[in-house]
Image: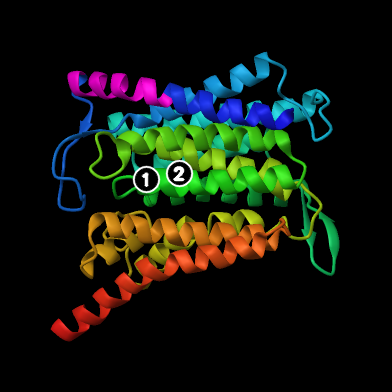
Amino acid sequence: MPYLYHLIAFLVSAFVVLWSTPIVRKFGLQSGLFDIPDKRKVHQRPMVRLGGVSIFLGTLAALLVVWWFGGFVDAKGAILPPSEEYEIWGVTIGGLAFFLIGLADDLFGLSAFTRLLVEVIVASLAWKAGVQIAFLSMPLIGLVNLPPWISLIITVIWLVGMVNATNWIDGLDGLAAGVSAIAAVVMLIVCLFMGQPAAALIAAALAGGLIGFLRYNFNPAQIFMGDGGAYFVGFTLAGVGVIGLVKTTAVTSVVLPYLILAVPILDMSAVILDRLRRGKSPFKPDKRHLHHRLLEVGLSHRMTVIFIYSLTIWAGSLALAFAGIPFGKIYLLGATLLLIYPAGKVWQQVVRMKKEG
């Protein structure tokens, strides 16, 4: 019975996003709230950047419907205690706050320092509300309780880092939405396997909303999620990682969120290190992201997105195998085979570029 609520959350969110996105797009076009192309951006025509409104509304509506029908239950089917129910709403409200930060940036263009400062404040408030990494299960050591100040620092870095990693990967049609949808589905599976159905509800709602949004966002896109959507999605994924995975006592839990979200994390880390190496500000936008580099070697827009999707599926399958999920190794094998074709296309383009260069 609890799994039925996850299906309901997925379907409600997808329906709301499919229904509301054209309305949001029409409003954005009529209001002049669209993004103008420039030399750093890939799109060639003005695009509405308010798709995050639909994703947020879909996720919120799904959770409210499930909550109304008494679907906030634990692994045994019992109604969640208030402390755990607060965690769900803590992630949701925190996601709303980050959505508003991103929306303000979309509409008014906040400075990098202002954005970072507000993000740290909101992440700190989320930690205060219970979305916190309070302990870690370390191999050979066991359970390690973290002092509050260390817990605060680690949690804020994780939440703010994932928000920006998701935003930075949002550079091609359908890229951030698809990568995040894959990560949300994997988190849904892992949370259910590890006995965290409440956190899985958020993942189900987010996955449904993102897959619905891809109907309008995959190449050629009709609308972008914008900073508001990317911030909301990034925080929600990070929040589910905290309340659904890291909080469990399994020794694998400490690395699972990093495996599931490896693609945006490694992309952001590589870009920051590259900018610092070249003496540039780590916050100054450029075309050094993975998707930019793949386009530079001659990959098409769609093949670039499909290759990064394949990488994300492979990383997610690795997390499934690492978590000990039944048939996890078979899923990993399948994901590896799936990765061969797009990886081969990338290699062919790299070899061709070297010959031509």
Q: Is residue 150 above or below residue 98?
A: below
Q: Residue at x 24, y 34 (%)?
A: 222
28 magenta-colored: yes
Residue placed under numbered mark 1 in the picture? 112
Q: Residue at x 71, y 52 (%)?
A: 150
Label 2 with label 1: CB-CB less than 8 Å? yes
Which SS class for mark 1?
helix
Residue 116, disc: 2
Q: Nearer the viewer, residue 45 or 118?
A: 45
Q: Is residue 329 above or below residue 203?
A: below
Position of the C terminus, as image quadrant, is: bottom left
> As shown in the figure, which amino acid type bears the numbered disc 1?
Ala
| Residue 228 appears in the picture as rendered | no
| Residue 222 appears in the picture as rendered | yes
Q: Is residue 242 above or below residue 330?
A: above
Q: Position of residue 64 (x, y in %)?
A: 60, 18
Q: CA distance from mark 2 to mark 1?
A: 6 Å
